[in-house]
Image (cartoon, rainbow, N blue to C red):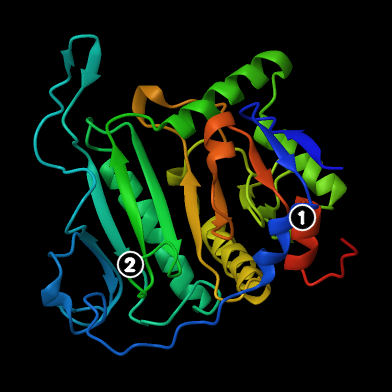
Amino acid sequence: MGELRKDPVVDRWVIIDPQRVERGALFQMEEPAGRVEKPCPFCQGSEGETPSEIFVLGEPGRKPNDKGWWVRVIPDKNPILRIEGGLERRAEGMFDLMNAVGAHEIVIETPDHYGDWSSLEDVQMRRILETYRARSLDLRNDRRFRQVMVVKNHGRAVSLFEHPHSHIVAFPVVPKGIEEEIQGVISYYRRKERCVFCDILKEELRMGRRSIFESRGFLAFAPFASRFPFETWILPKRHSPDFGEIKGEEIADLARTLKATMGMAFQTLANLSCSLIMHTGPLHEYSRPEYHWHMEIVPRLSKVAGFEWGTGFFVNPIPPEEAAARLKGERTSV
């Protein structure tokens, strides 16, 4: 029999049901696509095909918008939010609207067209995270923005470009997903005077059944109420609401944690497509010290069907305990 499990942060129920008939299809991986050699606007030598860079880490003495970069940040050519203009909040009858103002940047993570987070050198992973921090700290200087988020899509199911890249988006509002977490964190803190994410961290470290990888400052684990097969969270052990506060050694530690965790996922789930989302606290007066920043990795193995959309119940055929065991290469009887 399956189980109903409750997420302690947002009070969302999920159904864990390893008897689902679609379970077997999750392990029938399609063959990887052959590498197609074609011009890539993100590769070295194609800098003229992209908008001018707004941030770069590269070789000393390198000229702007030229070769010799290690990590390069450019505006998205087709942004979901545009940086020009004012918000112009207004009403249309009972409805509220404003201009789609914000920022949408592309982080070109490496000159290596076929690199991924499991194979990049540690120093390159640190550069990527340092870029995320630098852009987060810079974008918050714009008082129009209330939230900065990092989103990385990997694989054909979720990304148009094969070259490793990620998105940094600044919003003029706090996204609903973050707002729901904040409300859950505040409610938990009022009842127990503790951070719910810190309590989750302590419980996962104590039990160990869902832990995937532990470093000095971070834990990667399959959450108790996983919405999706092989969903993975990475939490810093030090309580902090803001990714922008991450320190130098923590960046190196997080780089190792991400590299190891993604390596396990690539080895277990061949030809993996996934999304990684950084959840960090809102900016300025909207920030909450009770919040705890973290990363969520969601492999795109199953589709959200009408039942999930209509009821809000996610159905996951892979128990998180089994997912953690498989990712670590342990035998499972399920």
The C terminus, quarter of image = bottom right
Question: Does residue 199 appear left or right of residue 61 in this picture?
Answer: right
| Residue 65 visible, this angle | no
- Callout 2: SS: loop
- Expressed as whole percent of the image width and height from the top left, the position of residue 115 reads 44, 79
Q: Amino acid at mark 1?
A: Ser
Q: Nearer the viewer, residue 59 or 324?
A: 324
- Callout 1: SS: strand
Residue that numbered label 2 is attached to: 160
Q: Residue at x 58, y 56 (%)?
A: 302
Question: Does residue 321 appear left or right of residue 236 in this picture?
Answer: right
Q: Quadrant of residue 144?
A: top left
10 Å crowding of disc 2: few (<14), some (14-19), many (20+) = few
Q: Quadrant of residue 311?
A: top right
Query: In the displayed structure, would residue 160 be above or below residue 38?
Result: above
Q: Amino acid at mark 2?
A: Leu
Q: Nearer the viewer, residue 204 or 222?
A: 222
- Expressed as whole percent of the image width and height from the top left, the position of residue 223 reads 70, 46
Q: Which mark is residue 199?
A: none
Q: Residue at x 65, y 26 (%)?
A: 11
- Expressed as whole percent of the image width and height from the top left, the position of residue 229 reads 66, 55
Residue that numbered label 1 is attached to: 211
Q: Residue at x 72, y 65 (%)?
A: 24
- Expressed as whole percent of the image width and height from the top left, the position of residue 208 reads 84, 52
| Residue 232 visible, this angle | yes
Measure how far apart labels 2 and 1 are at the Cα level.
32 Å
